[in-house]
Amino acid sequence: MKIAFITRSTLYKVHGGDTIQILETAEELRKLGIKVSIFLSHEKINYEDFDLLHFFNLIRPANILYHISKTNKPFVVSPILVDYTEYDRNHRKGLSGKLFKLFSSAEYMKTVCRWILMKDHLPSKSFLWKGQKKSVVYILEKAEMVLPNSPAEYQELEKLYAIKKPFTIVPNGINEKTFSNNSVIQKDQLLVICAARIEGIKNQINLVKALNDTQFKLLLIGNSSDNQKSYYNECKKIASKNIVFTGRLTQKELSSYYKKAKVHVLPSWFETCGLSSLEAAAMGCNIVVTDKGFTRDYFGGNAFYCNPESPESIYKAVVSAANADTSFKLKEKILQEFTWSIAAKKTLQAYERILSPIQKFCYH
């Protein structure tokens, strides 16, 4: 079986959760004997070399429209249905913030602006007159199946686009070889870490406000986004001495901090799950996560939830997590349900259903 992964042109330049999802899933599928090739959306593809096309990031429909107009090959979509509308309209600063308040589709504006500023490619010009929603609906109508990362994500997909599709839930995961902690290490109850790119949607500024001059030592692990240097600088400017900016770390270095810290916090304006939250929990951290997005499908009652808009809510959740016993129940759940090897097996099951004529239209 030969599969083409097709994704955003900035996959390697702007490293995100989808970068990890794509690379790890491809690697695990190869272990199962599947031939996977990864293409950036602007690259030329000989479609006839593949049995199936697999697109990522439905909120970037321009990347998908071009390719499905060039071939009749069956395809699936991993939606990665993030929604940053609240942040874009209420908290994003500068000219872009003013524009997002005026237009109904922030994602449409982002795509057009990236193209105009030559920060990204726009493979399909038809996106310009179709618009965001019509483009997404068109793609969903043509897709053989969607592969959401959680039941809540599929429900949101139905709600937003009023369309029902065959689907298979393919959860996000961890690399269990890298993030598996069987050693007994005394946790530092006052050490709190946040592993994420430093940018507005991840909301580090409210986290800094929440933990400034408190009993906790907060490590902000990650680099700033290229287009949000001012946000990074603002976070540093208001941070007290108990806040440390480490920059981006290797996975081995990150793993060592997961082992030591009692709490990992990700107070984003929206998360499908938060890969660093999964990794931290697998390493024995208690986790604080945003209450916005699909996080409850992953963590249920085994996490401490916060309102990203409220530094007080973030602080209270961190205190509760620091004082609670380590959640070994969540760690076991992650190792049993949320690994990249499991995600690859579920992905392969979806491919087989599509490529098998008998089971082609079965629902999961």
Image: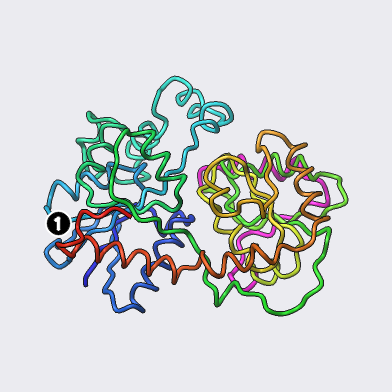
Disc 1 marks a residue whose amino acid type is: Lys
Q: How is the image coloured?
A: rainbow
Which residue is farthest top? 102
Residue 24: in magenta span: no
Q: Which residue shows up at 22% across the image and 55% down it?
A: 75
Q: Which residue is mark 1?
A: 73
Residue 208, given in percent of the width and then of the height, sits at: 74, 44
All told, the count of numbered labels is 1
Residue 118, given in percent of the width and then of the height, sits at: 34, 42
325 above or below 87?
below
Residue 249: in magenta span: yes
Residue 204, given in percent of the width and then of the height, sits at: 66, 44
| Image quarter hosting the N terminus | bottom left
Residue 77, given in percent of the width and then of the height, sits at: 30, 52
Q: Categorize mark 1 by other alpha carbons within 10 Å: few (<14), some (14-19), many (20+).
A: few
Q: Is residue 295 left or right of residue 127?
A: right
Magenta region: 226-253
Which of 179/323 is in front? Answer: 323
Which of 5/121 is in front? Answer: 5
Which image quarter: residue 43?
Answer: bottom left
Which image quarter: residue 221?
Answer: bottom right
